[in-house]
Amino acid sequence: MELADEITINAPMEKVYAALNDPEVLQQCIPGCEELIKHSDTELEAKVVLKIGPVKAKFKGDVQLDTAGAPDAFSLTGQGNGGAAGHAKGGADVTLTAEGPATTILRYEAKAQIGGKLAQLGNRLVQSTAKKLAAKFFTSFAELVDEDSAV
């Protein structure tokens, strides 16, 4: 399964990059995230509860960040286990482009693989749910980081 999109954020690129590396910001934006622990600058641990169709699962997983191209680009890879519901692994490449001093274009390309009960739900349901979750994350992230909405 592959996802790609872009979003415009009304904030300088440095602020967007810093927020993408802030566990508190990420925890607020990740749908169903109960806990996000930063073990190092490149290692995170997450606990997320998701409902995909009739299957509700609590995932526990690890995420590795590759910040070699930062702050213009970085990538992440991760895997999670949802017990009887199944497992997931994947990654994403994120690029940030400054559009003037106070606007940033965030683009991402993500790939994921799933197994277990989740894989039996059908690709369309899983793909549409993944798109909704990604859209929810980036909308929440943009609202949180957006300088126009800061009071």
Image (cartoon, grey):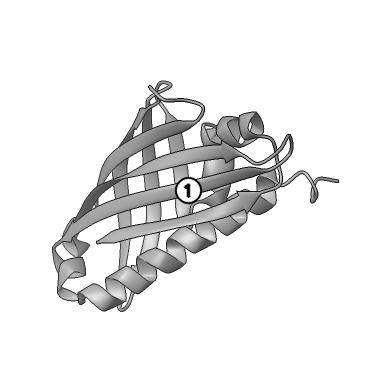
Please identify the quadrant where the N terminus is shown: bottom left
Residue 34 position, x and y percent, is 47, 49
Name the residue rendered at 69%, 43% in the picture.
103
Query: Camera-side residue: 110 or 87?
Result: 110
Examine the rendering and report whether any part of residue 55 can be seen: no
Residue 33, placed above or below residue 43: below
The percent coordinates of residue 96 (x first, y second) are: 53, 38
Look at label 1 and name its amino acid: Arg
The residue shown at (53%, 46%) is 106
The x and y percentages for residue 39 are: 39, 24
* Observer-nearest of 140 and 61: 140
Q: Between 5 and 127, which is closer to the camera in this rendering?
A: 5
- Looking at the image, residue 26 sits to the left or right of residue 62; the answer is right
Local SS, label 1: strand
The answer to whether residue 132 is above or below residue 75 is below
Q: Position of residue 43 (x, y in %)?
A: 36, 27
Q: Residue at x 71, y 38 (%)?
A: 100
Q: Which residue is mark 1?
A: 107
Q: Residue furthest right?
A: 151
Q: Residue at x 36, y 35 (%)?
A: 75
